[in-house]
């Protein structure tokens, strides 16, 4: 693809995202700090954030776990080097008090006049939590996250003092300063792959995110579910399916080491979505864009759609038709790859309008 073609694809998608994408949010994902040397990592974050903003993404997911750089500090870099892109900050309740998380949101709003999103976690890898002395069972962690998020919301939305008495947290007449304007209140996302996750999404008014099945197997958003829903999915698309699969297999080669690591990771995870995806095969099928090869080789944590622009666009349109309005993409390896993805969304939106 020429530079002119790349610019055209990017500009077209950017225009659609600001005019015709009001009901759909697309997030990219920030690189992880474990995948590069410290000197180059900061620049890589800036590059990916700018690419994401250029094609019209609403925001960018910033991961957190025990092995990664602090997502709040990474998000500050993103805010300083973009104009509209919103960091989607992964928030693990065990790491800090809800007042501290709320204070960070309020301070970023005060300093930059920008909105952030919060990806509320309950934690899936028991080893990370055990290292922090936390042995709370899976469903109780979601209940704890509900209290945690409720306190954050109340502190950011109320100019008066907030009091809260729960099982996990207690505050009394606590006020937030600086105050956050209503227009900068954070969007909230949470995993909706389990019953506990969906219950939590209802309780805190969050967008429930799933790792989807193929569109022909996916039940979609149930009627009267009461919360917005979205999916996390990677995309490799080209002008032909053959080109797309060649690029996908070069990027995500099958390795015995990766398969063993995936198997070990599943043993220490109590995440429902890990189990759901692991039950599906990872085989390459030119007639089926849905692919779990990268997941089964421990190269990423989401299903991929691989194929020509038109076919992958039909799959994306199918997810939209099933009621999903938020899409969280995988980490883009290059600007060109992200622009291929932009073409897919542009074609999907055109088909929905038609």
Image (cartoon, helix red, strand yellow):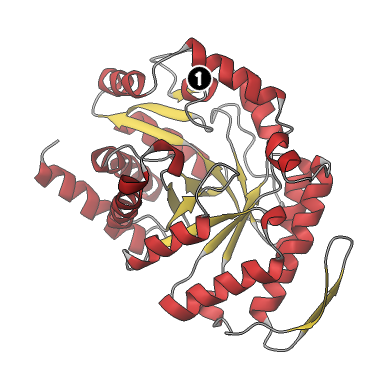
Residue 103 x/y as whole percent: 61, 74
The residue to which callout 1 is attached is: 297
Q: Is residue 238 left or right of residue 111?
A: left
| Location of residue 160 with respect to 194 vertically, above or below | below
Q: Is residue 115 visible?
A: yes
Residue 339 x/y as whole percent: 27, 43
Q: Is residue 282 visible?
A: no
Quarter of the picture containing the N terminus is: top left
Q: Is residue 7 left or right of residue 160?
A: left
Residue 168 x/y as whole percent: 85, 60
Closer to us: 99 or 234: 99
Q: Give SS at disc 1.
A: loop
Residue that lies at the very extreme toward the bottom in this rendered image? 160
Closer to us: 72 or 28: 72
Q: Is residue 29 left or right of residue 152?
A: left
Q: Quadrant of residue 34?
A: top left
Task: Report crowding for label 1: few under 14, some 14 to 19, many 20 or more residues within 10 A (C-alpha).
Answer: many
Residue 299 x/y as whole percent: 47, 27
Closer to us: 76 or 303: 76
Total numbered badges shown on the rendered structure = 1
Q: Quadrant of residue 152?
A: bottom right
Residue in view at x 59 percent, y 45 percent? 65
Residue in view at x 47 percent, y 60 percent? 73
Residue in view at x 71 percent, y 63 percent? 149
Q: Quadrant of residue 179?
A: bottom right
Residue in view at x 89 percent, y 61 percent? 167
| Location of residue 337 with respect to 196 vertically, above or below | above
């Amino acid at each position: 693809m020429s530079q002119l073609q790349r610019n055209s694809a990017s500009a077209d998608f950017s225009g659609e995202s600001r005019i015709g994408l009001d009901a759909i949010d697309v997030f990219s994902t920030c690189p992880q700090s474990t995948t590069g040397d410290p000197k180059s990592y900061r620049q890589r974050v800036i590059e990916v954030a700018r690419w994401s903003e250029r094609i019209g993404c609403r925001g960018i997911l910033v991961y957190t776990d025990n092995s990664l750089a602090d997502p709040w500090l990474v998000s500050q870099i993103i805010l300083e080097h973009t104009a509209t892109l919103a960091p989607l900050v992964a928030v693990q309740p065990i790491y800090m008090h809800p007042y501290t998380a709320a204070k960070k949101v309020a301070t970023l709003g005060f300093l930059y006049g920008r909105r952030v999103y919060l990806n509320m976690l309950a934690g899936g890898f028991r080893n990370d939590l055990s290292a922090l002395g936390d042995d709370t069972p899976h469903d109780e962690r979601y209940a704890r996250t509900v209290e945690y998020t409720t306190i954050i919301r109340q502190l950011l939305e109320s100019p008066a003092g907030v009091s809260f008495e729960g099982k996990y947290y207690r505050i009394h007449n606590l006020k937030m300063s600086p105050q956050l304007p209503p227009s900068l209140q954070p969007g909230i996302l949470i995993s909706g792959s389990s019953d506990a996750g969906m219950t939590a999404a209802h309780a805190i008014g969050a967008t429930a995110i799933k790792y989807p099945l193929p569109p022909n197997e996916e039940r979609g958003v149930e009627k009267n579910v009461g919360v917005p829903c979205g999916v996390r999915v990677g995309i490799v698309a080209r002008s032909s399916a053959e080109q797309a699969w060649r690029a996908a297999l070069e990027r995500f080669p099958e390795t015995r080491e990766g398969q063993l690591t995936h198997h070990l990771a599943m043993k220490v995870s109590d995440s429902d979505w890990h189990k759901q995806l692991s039950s599906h095969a990872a085989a390459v099928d030119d007639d089926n864009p849905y692919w779990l090869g990268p997941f089964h080789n421990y190269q990423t944590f989401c299903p991929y759609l691989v194929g020509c622009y038109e076919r992958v666009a039909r799959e994306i349109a199918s997810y939209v038709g099933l009621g999903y309005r938020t899409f969280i993409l995988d980490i883009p390896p290059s600007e060109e790859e992200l622009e291929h993805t932009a073409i897919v969304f542009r074609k999907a939106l055109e088909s929905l309008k038609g």
